[in-house]
Amino acid sequence: MQTHDFFIQLLAILLFARIFAEIATRWGAPSVIGELVAGVALGPSLLGWISPVELFKLLAEIGIILLLFQVGLETDARRLIRAGRKSVIVALLGFFLPLLLGFLVAWHFFGIRPLIALFIGGTLTATSIGITVRVLADLHRQHSEEGQIVLGAAVLDDVLGVILLALLYEYSVGGGVSLINTGKVVAFVAVFFVLAPIMAKLIAGIIRHFDTVSELPGLIPTTIVALVLFFAWLAHLMGAPELLGGFAAGLALSRRFFLPFGASLHTDPAFSEKIEKQMLPIISLFAPIFFVVVGLSLNMKAIDWSSSFIWTFSASLLGIAIFGKLAGAMMLHENWPTRWMIGTAMIPRGEVGLIFAELGRFNGILSNEVYAALLIVIAVTTLMTPFVMKALYSHFSSAFKA
């Protein structure tokens, strides 16, 4: 891409994201819907002005990592731990049910080969943590009890998704799965989640010290962005999703973070608030790029709308995609509106589903028709969920705890 083309396309992404977000907000919809629609409008689905090239995907990746850093920064670690058991139930059922049902339906009813059926089931396991937390933030429910359950479940879902993706890729390339390699991935992810917050807390102490003696402006945003990117790299190195590196860094710097055996590493609420204030403009710049790029990646023109197979197959998968995520929430001992909200918040597949589908298509595992059916499921679950969540909160507002 030529430099001047990049400038004008980035300009269009930022302006369209803001304009469509403002329109969505005026119409009473979450702002994330406007940003997703901006991507659909600019991309191959409609105007075809911008393609989701690698450069924009990299900017989008920075956006989601910084967004998860902000989520971690605002998260109450104690509430997240209290929601742990419920989050595990929602995540495990919401992961294994779509995987199993998607595999069985594709294999048994549509005669699709087992490996392809596994990729289809794997795509249905995904939950887009970025879209979920953004919608909760738009609705001012990210700190609620159901918000913490959803956050914990989405994080666990992402880790399980990465492990499954690694297994499917290894199977598709080598024709088998190594239990040793799988065990290494699980062990590295566990080590990362134990050590990362402690490391981030120690590094933050160094940054706080230099902030008191530095005479140059901008030390906090520069060093915090560097810290977040370092932890994203470290997460990838350990086999975890990069965005969870940002979340771990934010959680460690949160005003409500604690270390069971590290009382000396006390939290400085004023410093945490200073970080939050100075990082907000940077996050507000990069985060919308992520949602626009998700919209850019949904090429609806690639779908043969006259194909009966695509309609029946995508409808079957859509039913599994919705039921599979709602089922886990229905097992919780909560009131019915809360169960519906938690289950609905887990439905959007977004960029995580696209990663699965793209991997399958790129390696020649998914045919164009199967890929198109998955694209429909990803698009519908991604675009409908914010509207449904808003409607649930509006209709059952009295049933939700503050």
Image (spheres, rainbow, N blue to C red):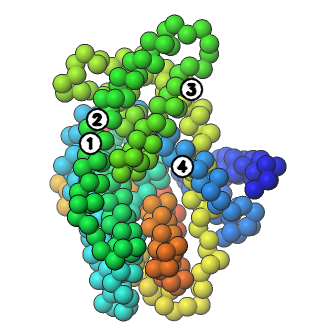
Gap between marks 3 and 2, in whole Å?
A: 23 Å
Q: Which mark is residue 61?
A: 4
Which amino acid, by three-letter code, is at mark 1?
A: Val
Q: Secondary structure at mark 1?
A: helix
Of callouts 1 and 3, the N-terminal one: 1
Gap between marks 1 and 2, in whole Å?
A: 6 Å
Q: Secondary structure at mark 3?
A: helix
Of callouts 4 and 1, the N-terminal one: 4
* Residue linked to disc 1: 191
Of callouts 3 and 2, the N-terminal one: 2
Q: Position of residue 235 (x, y in %)?
A: 39, 44
Neighbour class for label 4 at 10 Å: few (<14), some, many (≥20)? some
* Residue linked to disc 2: 195
Left or right: residue 263 compared with residue 201: left
**Nearer the camera: disc 1 or disc 3:** 1
Q: Are marks 3 and 2 in contact (CB under 8 Å)?
A: no
* Residue linked to disc 3: 222
Which amino acid, by three-letter code, is at mark 2?
A: Leu
